[in-house]
């Protein structure tokens, strides 16, 4: 699965192949929620986002790694 994250009109948006873009809603530092998903951003040594973990129901801490930008 590939997720694309981008800032659009001042909102952090999540894009997936099978669904329209959805805004992510912040809950706590580095955690966002959207449509039953919880994304927790992982930061590198320079404190820049380098990926995130995904929690979705029975799926817990599925790790995604940043591949561009």
Image: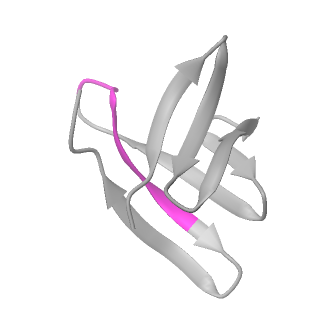
Name the residue nearer the viewer: 19 or 65.
19
Place of residue 5 in the rendered image (x, y in percent of width and height, measured from the top left): 48, 37
Q: Quadrant of the N terminus?
A: bottom left
Q: In the rendered view, would you say 20 is above or below 44?
A: below
Residue 19: x percent and y percent? 63, 56
Q: Is residue 17 left or right of residue 58?
A: left
Identify the residue shown where x is 23% and y is 32%: 45
Q: Quadrant of the C terminus?
A: top left
The answer to whether residue 49 is left or right of residue 41 is left
Nearer the observer, 11 or 51: 11
Write down the region rendered in magenta. 46-54
**Residue ID at (56%, 78%):** 60
21 left or right of 34 in image: left
User: What colour-coding does the image apply?
Assistant: one colour
Q: Position of residue 14 (x, y in %)?
A: 58, 42
The overriding secondary structure of the stretch rendered in magenta is strand
Q: Is 49 a magenta residue? A: yes
Q: How many marks?
A: 0
- Residue 55 x/y as whole percent: 61, 69
Q: Is residue 8 above or below residue 24?
A: above
2 over 11 or under it: above or below: below
* Quarter of the image where one finds residue 58: bottom right
């Amino acid at each position: 699965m590939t997720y694309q994250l981008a800032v659009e009109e001042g909102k952090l948006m999540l894009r997936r192949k099978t669904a329209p873009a959805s805004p992510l809603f912040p809950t706590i530092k580095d955690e966002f929620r959207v449509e039953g998903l919880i994304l927790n951003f992982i930061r590198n040594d320079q404190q820049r986002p380098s990926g995130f973990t995904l929690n979705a129901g029975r799926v817990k801490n599925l790790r995604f790694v940043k591949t561009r930008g």
